[in-house]
Image: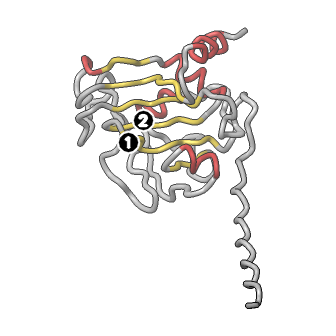
Amino acid sequence: MPLWGVLAAACLAAAPGPWTRVVEVTGTGRSVDDVVLDDEAAFNALFKMCPVVGYWRNGQRHSVYVRASEVPAEFDAYGLFVETWSESSNRLHDDFEIYDSLADAQAGTGQWQYSNFDHTGVGYPRDAGKTSSQTHQWFAHPGTSTLLMHGLHEGAWFAVYTASGCPSLAGTQTPVPPTPAPPTPSPPPPPPPPPPPP
């Protein structure tokens, strides 16, 4: 089994719920001392299996990235998300989509419409937004970037989807097709007329 497979199996065995954290900073994330988890190997290995990444800021889910195209053999997901959000093999609506939530990603609805790229030291999602630019939501690793994350006081982290049924068709894990919306129930029939008076 390749090294990434061994790493992924180890991470999967310990993963509670659908997500496995792979990078995390606490507090304001402005010091190397704030880095509490920084697992480049696990990030890249798990991404190859299921290229779906959640991003949390200040304890709230910010967004969910879903890869739409095949993951290139030498693709560095860790570098893309943590170090510099780049357009190389990573174009919005061609190679990936961003959603507000896992539920939206699984349903394939509510894709974000804006993303920009390629500012060294600015990680995911740079200024991406649902309809337009949303500044200062990006990740910057305090050990490799000279930039500081704005508005961060309760940490930030990335997690890769590791439950069964990967929402992306691009990974090596067998995906589960999106669940169709349940049919709208028919209205109940009208009550029968009252009996005639005696």
Residue drawn at (59%, 42%) of the image: 66
Counting labels gives 2
Q: Quadrant of residue 68?
A: top right
Where, quadrant-wise, is the C terminus in this rendering?
A: bottom right
Q: Residues within 10 Å of mark 2 (few under 14, many from 20)?
A: many
Name which quarter of the figure residue 57 lies in.
top left
Residue 46, above or below 99: above
Foreground residue among 80 and 6: 6
Assess whether mark 2 and mark 1 are in contact (beta carbons under 8 angstroms). Answer: yes
Kind of residue indicated by mark 2: Thr
Write the residue at 65% across / 40% down: 167
| In this rendering, position of residue 107 left or right of residue 26 | right
Distance between mark 1 and mark 2 Cα atoms: 6 Å
Give the answer, above or below, for where 167 lies relative to 33. Answer: below
Q: In the image, residue 95 lies at what x, y percent? A: 62, 45
For badge 1, the amino acid type reads His
Q: Residue under circle 1?
A: 119
Task: Tell me if mark 1 has few (under 14), some (14-19) or many (20+) residues whose alpha carbon lies within 10 angstroms of its own.
Answer: few
Q: Which residue is mark 2?
A: 84
Residue 137 % position (x, y): 34, 45
Residue placed at 31% from the left, 21% from the top? 143
Q: What's the coloring here? A: secondary structure
Residue 110: quarter of image: bottom right
Q: Quadrant of the N terminus?
A: top right
- Single out the residue that lies furthest toward the bottom: 197
Residue 13 percent coordinates (x, y): 60, 13
Residue placed furthest toward the front: 198
Query: Which is more N-terminal, label 2 or label 1?
Result: 2
| Callout 1: SS | loop
**Helix, strand or loop status at disc 2:** loop
Residue 127: x and y in percent read: 38, 50
Camera-nearest residue between 110 and 115: 110
